[in-house]
Image (spheres, rainbow, N blue to C red):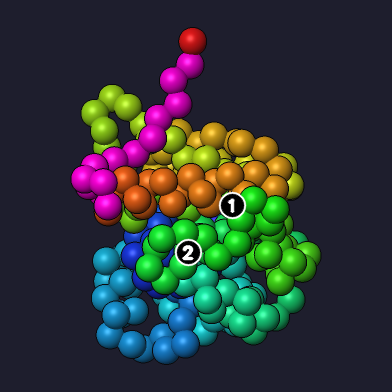
Amino acid sequence: MTIGIIGSGNVGGTLGTRWARAGHDIIYGTRNPQADDIQQLLSQAGGKARAATLKETARAGDALLLAMPWKVIQSVLEGLGDLTGKVLIDATNPLLADLSGLDIGTTSSAGEKVAGWARGAKVVKAFNTIGANIMANTSFGSEKPALCYCGDDTEAKQIVKQLAEEIDFEPLDVGPLTQARLLEPFALLWISMALKYGYTRDIAFRLLRR
C-alpha cells in the first residue's frame, strides 16, 4: 500500500517510519521535500520512503494520514485537491494552544470537520489518543495498547485496523465518525495524565474483557 503522510512531525514521522519498515511505500508530504528534517526522516524510514509536495502526496497515496496542528488543517485540506474515494486517517485533535481544553467538542468534532473539508474522502478517526513515543514502541510486555478508531466507511476502517495491527496495537472499532466527539476528549485525558499529573508519556490504555 502507498501511504501519504500529511504532516512530518512526531506522529506523522513515527507512523510513516513504522509503516515503511512494515513494507509499505511511504510518501511524506511537505512544502519543501528537500528540507534537512525531511531527508533525516527518509533516512530513518529506509528505502520505501520518499518525499513530495502535499498535493502530489495526496494524489499518489492509497491512504492518507493527516497529522498536522489543528489550526492549519482546513487550509491544508483545501489545498490538496480532489480527495474523493481516498482513505483519510485523521490523527488530529482540536487542542487549544495551552493544552487546557478543546477548540470544539460535544456537538461536533475535528473528525467531522475534516470530513466536511475533505468532501468525498473516507475519513477514519484514529491514532489520536496515544503519544508518538508509544507509536514508536508499542511494547508493554505481553499486553498490546488499545487503539480506538471510528468512521462511517467499513472498507476504510478495515484498512486502519490492518495498519494498527501491523505495528502491534489492539485496534478497537468504536463506531461511526460521530464517536470522534468522545475520542478527542479521551486524547485530552491521556495528554493531561502524561504531562500534568505525573503519569509520564510511557502510558497506554487497555480494554479488559470478561
**The N terminus lies in which quarter of the figure?**
bottom right
Image-based side of 130 in relation to 113, left or right? left
Image-based side of 95 in relation to 79, left or right? left
**Rendered residue at 51%/60% (across/down):** 102
Give the percent coordinates (x, y) of residue 96: 46, 67
Q: Is residue 74 above or below residue 114?
A: below
- Which of the two labelled residues, at mark 1 and mark 2, occupies the earlier sequence position? 2
Give the percent coordinates (x, y) of residue 89: 58, 57
Locate residue 115: give its quadrant. bottom right
Badge 2 is on which residue?
95
**Rendered residue at 38%/46% (across/down):** 190
Q: Which residue sits furthest front? A: 100
Identity of the amino acid at label 1? Lys
Range drawn in magenta: 196-209
Q: Nearer the viewer, mark 1 or mark 2?
A: 2
Does the rendering let one see residue 49?
A: no
Badge 1 is on which residue?
125
**Rendered residue at 28%/85% (across/down):** 36
Q: Is residue 138 above or below residue 27?
A: above
In whole angstroms, how far apart are the C-alphas of marks 1 and 2? 15 Å
Between 86 and 45, the residue placed more toward the observer is 86
Image-based side of 210 in relation to 159, left or right? left
Q: Is residue 199 magenta?
A: yes
Give the percent coordinates (x, y) of residue 182: 58, 44
Identity of the amino acid at label 2? Leu
Give the percent coordinates (x, y) of residue 47: 35, 67
Circle 1 packing at 10 Å, graded few (<14), some (14-19), many (20+), is many
**Rendered residue at 35%/60% (across/down):** 14
Q: Is residue 110 above or below residue 124?
A: below
Q: Main secondary structure of the magenta part?
A: loop
Between 64 and 72, the residue placed more toward the observer is 72
Q: Is residue 36 magenta?
A: no
